[in-house]
Image (cartoon, rainbow, N blue to C red):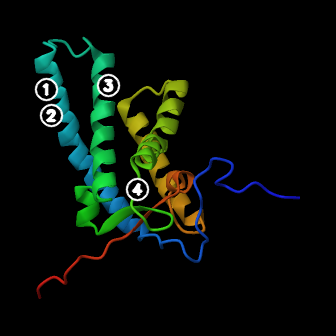
């Protein structure tokens, strides 16, 4: 019986495990994740400020849905443009990481978009659960999200190539990116 190939089924082609790029160390990826959060705080704050001034928003609840949509697009553009251009955001450069396809090639805009959407697996499940449980405090929600992030990161250790599961879904990998020249001693 002939099995359909991944390419014929419309899925992202997977490279064999022995030729696929090796995963960067988990601690380095998580350090970049935390640094990314700090950087995104500034990006989202600036976006919110420009939006509030441009839209004459004098109340936080006024145009809230529109602000959320704008923030979603701006953060998406931040990641997609940088991943396609160089495979790296500033935190990824700092921690010597690069996003590549499973074959080691640069990421296409479509694949970067799919990865951006799939990366919400870091946050949406615990936030949905917090809403369903009607958690009483911000600290309870924070604890649930933080616990999920730790479990999701550790789940990468269960993957054969130690990649995050949204990377496995998208056919991407976070690999170690060596500096072009050795650092002076």
- What percent of the width, then of the height, locates residue 156? 53, 61
Where disc 2 sits, the SS reads: helix
Location of mark 4 (residue): 107
Q: CA distance from mark 4 to mark 3?
A: 27 Å
- What percent of the width, then of the height, locates residue 23? 46, 70
Q: CA distance from mark 4 to mark 2?
A: 28 Å
Where disc 4 sits, the SS reads: loop
Number of the label disc, if any, that sits on residue 46 = 2
Frontmost residue, 115 versus 111: 111
Q: In the displayed structure, would residue 141 be above or below residue 171?
A: above
Q: Earlier in the sequence, mark 3 or mark 2?
A: 2
Residue at 33% from the left image edge and 32% from the top image edge = 72
Q: Earlier in the sequence, mark 1 or mark 4?
A: 1
Q: Residues within 10 Å of mark 4 (few under 14, many from 20)?
A: many
Location of mark 1 (residue): 50
Where disc 1 sits, the SS reads: helix
Frontmost residue, 128 versus 175: 175
Q: Earlier in the sequence, mark 3 or mark 1?
A: 1
Q: Mark 3–mark 1 contact, CB under 8 Å?
A: no
Q: Mark 4–mark 3 contact, CB under 8 Å?
A: no
Location of mark 3 (residue): 68
Mark 4 vs mark 2: give the one in front.
Answer: 4
**For this view, does 167 lie left or right of residue 86?**
right
Residue at 42% from the left image edge and 46% from the top image edge = 146
> In the rendered view of the protein, which quadrant contains the C terminus?
bottom left
Q: Residues within 10 Å of mark 3 (few under 14, many from 20)?
A: few
Q: Earlier in the sequence, mark 4 or mark 3?
A: 3
């Amino acid at each position: 019986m002939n099995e359909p190939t991944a390419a014929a089924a419309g899925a992202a082609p997977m490279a064999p495990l022995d030729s696929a790029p090796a995963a960067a160390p988990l601690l380095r990826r998580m350090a970049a994740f935390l640094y990314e959060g700090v950087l995104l705080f500034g990006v989202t704050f600036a976006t919110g400020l420009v939006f509030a001034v441009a839209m004459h928003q004098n109340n936080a609840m006024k145009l809230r849905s529109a602000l959320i949509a704008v923030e979603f697009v701006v953060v998406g553009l931040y990641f997609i443009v940088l991943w396609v251009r160089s495979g790296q955001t500033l935190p990824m450069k700092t921690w010597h990481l690069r996003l590549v396809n499973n074959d080691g090639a640069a990421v296409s805009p479509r694949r970067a978009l799919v990865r951006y959407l799939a990366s919400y697996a870091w946050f949406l499940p615990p936030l949905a659960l917090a809403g369903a449980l009607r958690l009483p405090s911000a600290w309870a929600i924070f604890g649930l999200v933080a616990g999920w992030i730790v479990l999701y990161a550790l789940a990468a250790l269960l993957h054969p190539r130690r990649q995050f599961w949204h990377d496995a879904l998208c056919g991407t990998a976070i690999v170690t990116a060596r500096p072009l020249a050795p650092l002076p001693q």
